[in-house]
Image (cartoon, rainbow, N blue to C red):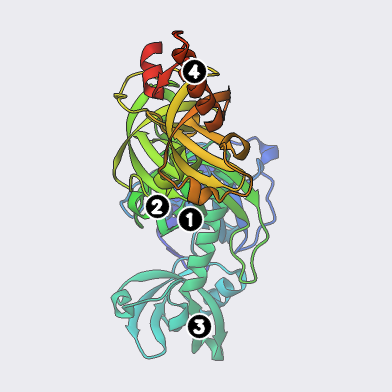
């Protein structure tokens, strides 16, 4: 490359190309625009040639960039007709009628050109010739310059000597003693390019957009993703439909992922600067939702696996990505304290499915149930005589789990006044946990089962009395809750 202060055989060809392209514009559109070296411009590509790419600045003037400025490291041209590109004015030659744009000024051929690059804040190209204790030795168009080690890269540079021999871009930060002391910064160039890339990426992002990025960090609460200079976060809840999946098991730093933008919010930058947008991403939004193909129904018996326990119950995996909650109230005191551990299989019945909230409530399967069977909600008839076991004792009565049942539906309360014992009796001594009782059903309902020990004894005594009188009266029924279920099927 060259500056306006240099002569190059290629100038004539560029000038000819520029004049040829400019001649296509109406005369009224060829009025000169006031430009200065260093101005940053947004321009639209109007022609792509072998040596130059022409752009329209404002409908009144055109400029060009050398093709080499717009090639990727692999040598591919990264722009096409109609694209909008950002560049800086690096050369204005009114005598030849052209304006040259570029990412850098190239290699200035004089100290004056280096000073001009400093004033315009246009990057220059320099070749790293050596490394000393303080930083990099750089040759810029025949002049020696120095890049402090702290300005050699945007991040910590492990092996500065690896840069020797490379031609890199620098911003000139100081020119003293007539060019004998020139200080440059590569870090400033990299930070500016990163900011421009982040701004371009941020402007192209909208809620709902599907983008590709690279995972830069993984935490318990989510994963950070670089979207091309701007960073977004995949919260843990958006990593997978399976809520039990750990972020670290699903993602690793360096993974390239395709995600959907679910939210964007403006935020105030911190004391050290930083992002002004909070971008929330989702990985699971692009994955098949197992709830969409859910083949489960209320009342069905399912063989599941306990995947997590909590104070309020156990989470049971029913199908890939589908979990249900077996609430502690359905487990009973002993089952809640012990019961199935994480990883163990357990038979449950689906009590309720809330597809909107994606929640499933479970109850223990009754004895004798098999996977795939359907258990209907069978209520115990009022007045029935059934057997059960004392599960919990309170000051106001004892809770009895009816034989053949599991969970709250088969658990009833025998109030103190229905126990048939004197007031003030110590219920824990009179009816220790595990005591077998025969009780009478007084009341039923959703989650309510009221029983009576005294009523069962009264019925038994009445039956014995009637039998003694030669009558055939017997208790209404006597058996387990499971027996009643089998009769109803």
Q: Secondary structure at mark 2?
A: helix
Q: Secondary structure at mark 1?
A: loop
Q: Are marks 2 and 1 in contact (CB under 8 Å)?
A: yes
- Per the rendering, the mark at residue 64 is none
Foreground mark, 4 or 3, reads 4
- Taking depth in this image into account, of 324 and 478 the one nearest to the observer is 478
Question: Which numbered disc, 4 or 3, marks the residue that appears first in the sequence?
Answer: 3
- Per the rendering, the mark at residue 183 is 3
Q: CA distance from mark 1 to mark 3?
A: 44 Å
- Estimate how packed mark 1 is, as few (under 14), some (14 to 19) or many (20 or more) residues with alpha carbons within 10 Å: some
Placement of the C terminus among the 4 image quadrants: top left
* Residue occupied by mark 2: 247
Spot occupied by residue 354 in the image (x, y as percentages of width and height):
53, 27
Q: Secondary structure at mark 4?
A: helix
Q: Residue at the location (55% across, 71% down)?
A: 117
Q: Is residue 254 above or below residue 376?
A: below
- Per the rendering, the mark at residue 221 is 1
* Residue occupied by mark 4: 465
Q: Are marks 1 and 3 in contact (CB under 8 Å)?
A: no
Question: Which numbered disc, 1 or 4, marks the residue that appears first in the sequence?
Answer: 1
Question: Which numbered disc, 2 or 3, marks the residue that appears first in the sequence?
Answer: 3
Q: Secondary structure at mark 3?
A: strand
Spot occupied by residue 128 in the image (x, y as percentages of width and height):
35, 77
Foreground mark, 2 or 4, reads 4
Foreground mark, 2 or 3, reads 2
- Taking depth in this image into account, of 308 and 471 the one nearest to the observer is 471
- Estimate how packed mark 3 is, as few (under 14), some (14 to 19) or many (20 or more) residues with alpha carbons within 10 Å: many
Q: CA distance from mark 1 to mark 4?
A: 71 Å
Q: Is residue 20 above or below residue 95?
A: above
Kindly tell me whether residue 370 is visible in this rendering: yes
Q: CA distance from mark 2 to mark 4?
A: 71 Å
- The answer to whether residue 256 is left or right of residue 421 is left
């Amino acid at each position: 490359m060259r500056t306006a202060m240099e002569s190059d055989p290629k100038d004539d060809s560029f000038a000819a190309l520029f004049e040829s392209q400019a001649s296509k514009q109406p005369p009224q559109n060829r009025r000169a625009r006031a430009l200065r070296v260093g101005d940053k411009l947004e321009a639209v590509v109007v022609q792509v040639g072998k040596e130059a790419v022409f752009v329209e600045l404002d409908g009144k003037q055109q400029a060009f960039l050398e093709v080499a400025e717009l090639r990727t490291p692999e040598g591919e041209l990264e722009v096409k007709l109609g694209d909008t590109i950002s560049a800086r004015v690096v050369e204005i030659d009114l005598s030849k009628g052209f304006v040259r744009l570029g990412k850098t000024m190239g290699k200035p051929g004089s100290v004056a050109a280096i000073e001009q690059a400093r004033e315009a804040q246009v990057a220059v190209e320099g070749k790293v010739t050596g490394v000393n204790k303080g930083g990099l030795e750089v040759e810029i168009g025949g002049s020696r310059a120095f890049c402090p080690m702290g300005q050699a890269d945007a991040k910590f540079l492990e092996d500065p000597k690896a840069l020797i021999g490379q031609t890199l871009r620098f911003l000139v930060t100081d020119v003293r003693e007539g060019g004998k002391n020139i200080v440059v910064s590569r870090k400033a160039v990299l930070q500016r390019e990163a900011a421009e890339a982040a701004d371009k990426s941020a402007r192209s992002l909208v809620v709902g957009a599907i983008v590709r990025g690279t995972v830069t960090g993984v935490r318990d609460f989510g994963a950070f993703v670089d979207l091309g200079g701007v960073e977004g976060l995949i919260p843990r809840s958006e990593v997978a439909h399976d809520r039990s999946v750990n972020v670290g098991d699903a993602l690793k730093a360096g993974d390239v992922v395709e995600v959907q933008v679910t939210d964007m919010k403006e935020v105030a930058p911190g004391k050290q600067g930083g992002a002004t947008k909070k971008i929330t991403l989702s990985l699971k939004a692009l994955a098949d939702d197992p709830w969409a193909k859910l083949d489960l129904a209320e009342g069905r018996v399912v063989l599941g696996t306990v995947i997590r326990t909590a104070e309020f119950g156990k989470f049971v995996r029913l199908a890939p990505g589908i979990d249900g909650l077996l609430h502690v109230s359905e487990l009973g005191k002993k089952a809640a304290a012990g019961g199935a551990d994480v990883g163990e299989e357990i038979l449950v019945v689906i009590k309720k499915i809330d597809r909107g909230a994606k929640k499933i409530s479970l109850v223990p399967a009754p004895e004798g149930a098999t996977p795939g069977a359907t258990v209907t909600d069978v209520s115990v008839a009022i007045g029935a005589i059934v057997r059960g076991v004392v599960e919990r004792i309170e000051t106001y009565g004892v809770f009895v789990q009816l034989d053949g049942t599991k969970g709250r539906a088969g658990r009833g309360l025998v109030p103190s006044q229905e126990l048939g014992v004197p007031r003030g009796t110590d219920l824990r001594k009179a009816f220790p946990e595990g005591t077998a009782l025969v009780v009478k059903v007084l009341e039923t309902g959703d989650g309510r089962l009221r029983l009576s020990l005294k009523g069962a004894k009264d019925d038994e005594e009445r039956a014995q009395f009637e039998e003694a009188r030669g009558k055939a009266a017997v208790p209404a029924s006597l058996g387990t809750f499971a027996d009643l279920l089998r009769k109803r099927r």
